[in-house]
Amino acid sequence: MTAADFDEAEKLWRECEGVRLSALDDRAGFERFLARNAGFSQTARINGVLAAAVLAGHDGRIGYLHHVAVAPPFRRHGLGRSIVGRCLDLFRSAGVGSVYAFVVETNVVGHEFWKSLLWSRRDVHVMQIALIEGSSLV
């Protein structure tokens, strides 16, 4: 994924149920994330159309997957599994020991996807404070 993917990725994320964007997901935030985590975020294209995308990064120990999305017409063909798999391979190569995927509580499709990949739900709650107005996902 590159900065040039922003418009298409944002459109995909806004169209996919269960994906929540905040003020931090603007073009500048997107570009900062990609620069800080160069080479980890992934896309999949079919006939030039952005069919799937994920923002991926890590802190040196734990990997994080944000906004994993596959456009509805392209679901059930392994694209989600493929882009997540690429991220996991990159994380392994970087020595990352564990990976978290952020899934909105009410995102039934998302929960089913992660369970199908044998991911397990953690018993933690994410706490948040908004430092920039509009950055809260609540």
Image: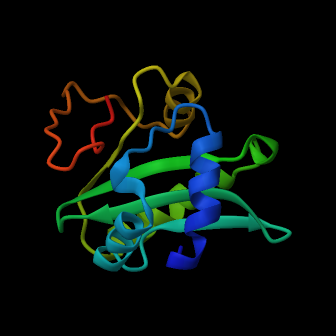
Q: Is residue 33 above or below residue 66?
A: below
- Residue 68 percent location from the top left of the image: 51, 48
Residue at the limit of the structure toward the front, as seen here: 133
Q: Is residue 109 above or below residue 50?
A: above
- Residue 99 percent location from the top left of the image: 31, 52
Residue 2 appears in the picture as rendered: no
- Residue 16 percent location from the top left of the image: 62, 39
Does residue 69 appear to the left or right of 58 in the view shown? right
Q: Residue at x 37, y 79 (%)?
A: 38
* Nearer to the camera, 34 or 95: 34
On-image quarter of the C terminus: top left
- Residue 41 percent location from the top left of the image: 46, 67
What count of labels does the image hold? 0
* Nearer to the camera, 112 or 70: 70
Residue at the limit of the structure toward the right, as seen here: 47
Q: Which residue is drawn at 59% across and 59% down?
A: 9
